[in-house]
Image (cartoon, coloured by chain):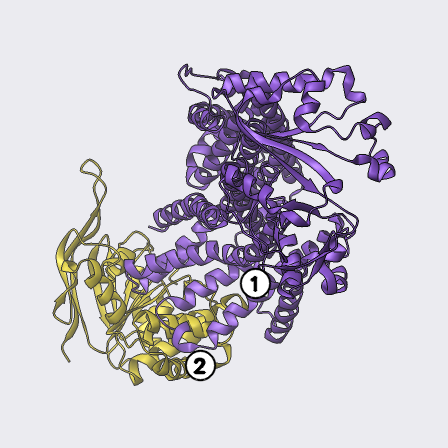
Chain colours: A yellow, B purple
Amino acid sequence: MGNLLNVSKIEKYYGSRSSLTKAIDDLSFKVDRGEFVAIMGASGSGKTTLLNVISTIDKVTSGHIYIDETDITKLKGNNLNKFRREELGFIFQDFNLLDTLTAYENIALALSIQRTSANDLEHKVKDVAEKLDIKNVLNKYPYQMSGGQKQRVAAARAIVTNPKIILADEPTGSLDSKSAKMLLERFNYLNEELKATILMVTHDAFTASYATRVIFIKDGKLFKELYRGDKNRKEFFEDIIDVVTLLGGELEGAL
Amino acid sequence: MLFKLSLKNITKSFKDYAIYFLTLILGVAIFYVFNALDSQTVMMNVSSSAQDIIKLMMNMLSGVSVFVSFILGFLIIYASRFLIKRRNKEFGIYLTLGMSRRKISLILFFETLFIGLISLIIGIGLGTILSQFMSLLVANMFEADLTKFTFVFSKASALKTVIYFGIMYLLVMIFNTVVISKCKLIDLLASSKTNEKIKLKNPYLCVIIFIIASIILGKAYYMVTYDVHTLSEVTDIIKPIIMGVIATFLIIWSLSGLILRISMSRPKFYYKGLNSFTIRQFSSKINTTVVSMTIICLMLFITICFLSACLTIKNSMNANMKKLAPVDAQFATLMNMDKDYDYYRGFGYSDNQIKNSHIKVTDMFKIFGMDITKYFKEYIEVNTYATHGLTMNDTLGSKLQMMKDKFPFLNYSTEETIMKISDYNKVAAMYGNKKYTLKKDEYIIIADFESLVKIRNVALENNEVIKVFNHSLKPKYQKCQDGFIDMSSNHINTGIVVVPDEVIDENYLNQNYIIGNYKVKDKDKIAALENKINALRKNPKVTDYLLPSGNTKYDIREATIGLSAMVTFIGIYLGIIFLISSAAILALKELSESSDNRERFIMLRKLGADEKMINKALFRQILIFFMFPLVLALIHSVFGIMFAMNILEVFGKEELFSSIIMTAIFIVFIYGGYFLITYLCSKNIIK
């Protein structure tokens, strides 16, 4: 399998010349098609900035990001919007569902923005709802759903358009442990059965242990990479904890 | 510190305040302009009767101003309640930090004070500038020369504006204090978190309510248009109005549920682009604003009807004046009053007046010591006749009963005015109206009062034969012919039966007329002459002799100008206030929600919706929100204007079309302006 995502020597600076902050400092890594990658780091390590530049919400100061040979740092205007809506799927910490729409409509909106015809729409939504086990909440509004249900609806919205890569920003951040587990199992299912490529930012070791690879970032630089290989989730979790300890307690709350 | 906080709050939330601020300034400016109208005219050279009319107009305008201040007061309180709601969290934080309620009230007090002061200063400044343009308009209307144009500032109006708005702001301050002292901390902090619950209304209930409301509305429409003649008392109109208000509310209530349902049932439309989002946005907004939507709709309706009616009156009056007062003067006196001694006695004529009612106009003037004919360059003398033998009972003939059933309030036993064809043609020649010829056995009815024309036409179409002084006559035309003999500012000729000369019995002479043009042409000289004629009323002989009554072009003109100026100003005044109030409520509602919308639009952007799509969605969302009450108001207005035209038919309908166009331009300008500002501001906020 080839590289789907290629992050090459990117830098991101904030602030003025007098007080420069390097959020990302010469960072490179690659993600293969069908991988489930978690990015870990303490607050301020640059992980959210990284996700923002990959998702084209923010721009890099220098360097390149390729998704499927396309240099997304060079995209502009409507091409950028087109790229975002056709190639990317987003899942956010605070769900970001539209509170005026039902779950069904929230999922359908992602499709109708892509100008999917109304005929295809219904079975696509039903299909994805089945995969994420949210068929029974499709007609509910966000305020009628639990956090876990909301996040699964958000996940459904992210994958219904068949994006090349799903970007998840602290997806379990607002969930209790049971809901978080359920969501992550769904992620595993999407990754293993549907071969979805997932890039997830988290500061939680448990969440990260569901991934096939974990990239640790410190001060905007790559600190360490861990592959799951043949280990089971529990063993992988312990490996992650070791690195977190190595990072020196800066990742508080990860344990 | 509090002072500083208030000042910062205002500058910070300027985006929210901007349109509120603009509305206040406009309100102040307009209030000032219309109350300063008289000071504009003081400088002008207008006649004394015009001065009287201006005085009357100012009295009317200050009455209207009280009403206007109520409307603006409600708007201001509504708006400030709105703006406080938006800032619940801010106040919650103040309270948790230990600030007392009294101090928060003080912050709000200062804020209102700043806004009030600034809006008053800018508003009166703007008003002063606008009133200079207004004086051009006033001068044009009263035909005064503007040679000595001076810059006018009305202290009285400014003071009045400050007092009225001061009271309104004071009320707002009291209101705010009450709101703050009542609120609970938990509600303040949690207000942004409590998700808006979306209740889908039962579609069947909505349909039923919608149908019921439509029926009520249809009935109300019917009552004020086709069935209007049954509304004989002023209080009768209250019923259809109440029905209309209730129906409007129910229609908005049911449509707010139905629109969503209907569009959801059409998936091809609903799931196209951002349609589902737009419709949901609109429907959640209208669900929470049914009452305000109803009020806005009704205000728009009143504006449309009132403004177009006022403009029609104004335009028609000016047009009528040229047509219906074509010569300088017309004098008439009653003849042979002793035939109906008791009848005239009942009207308060004296014995001698009735006894002396055989003297014709010119001779009568001579008795009062004036040779009227020498003031005329040209004049004609004509007579009209009347007899108990010819009343409306007779002219309507076989159609009488039908008409009595339909129009029970008419007095059918009034004697008809009869005229010789030769006399009528003399008058027509003088007035520039159409002349007629008659065969021995024919008659014509000349009338221009629309509802009576309609009644008479029914009989004429039936070829109703009438008996005039023992001659049987049949109608020459199947319709009433346009024309008149009494000059006036309106179409009020209810009917003259014109017959061949030889039919007339001179014993039944009823009125003697002289109609003509003065020798003098100059406006001031005509005024002087008419003052002299009017002075005859003080002559002691008036108790014994009937002084001929007159309709003169000069009088009609002065009255017309004054009245048309009055209706124009009141129409525009109320129109602007109603329009800016309703548009401001919509704009405030839309803009204050823009922060919620901001999150939603950011979300849409993350989902990959491009700017074009988002702008389109925003534009549509605001457009629907603004159009919804307007469309309903327009439908109301169709019937409202029909009703108004029925009442105002004496003024004629010729000018209706141009008035509606003018009203439309007016609405597009103000309402559309608010719409555009709202769109641009919202676009700016969601960026």
Residue A178 in the figure: left or right of residue A92: right
Q: Residue at x 28, y 77 (%)?
A: A162
Q: Residue at x 44, y 75 (%)?
A: A104
Q: Residue B495: tell me if it is visible.
A: no
**B24 lies above or below B364:** below
The residue lying toward the viewer, choosing from B345 and B235, is: B345
Mark drawn on residue A213: none
Q: Are marks 2 and 1 in contact (CB under 8 Å)?
A: no
**A223 lies above or below A211:** above
Q: Residues within 10 Å of mark 2 (few under 14, many from 20)?
A: some
Q: Residue B410: tell me if it is visible.
A: yes
Amino acid marked by disc 2: Asp
Amino acid marked by disc 1: Lys
Would you name the residue on which mark 1 appears?
A: B197
Q: Quadrant of the N terminus of chain A?
A: bottom left
Quote the CA–CA distance across marks 2 and 1.
24 Å
Do discs 2 and 1 share a chain? no
**Secondary structure category for the residue under label 2:** loop
The residue lying toward the viewer, choosing from B203 and A115, is: B203
Host chain of mark 1: B
Host chain of mark 2: A
Q: Position of residue A212 (x, y in %)?
A: 27, 75
Q: Quadrant of the C terminus of chain A?
A: bottom left
Would you name the residue on which mark 2 appears?
A: A133
Residue A52 in the figure: left or right of residue B411: left
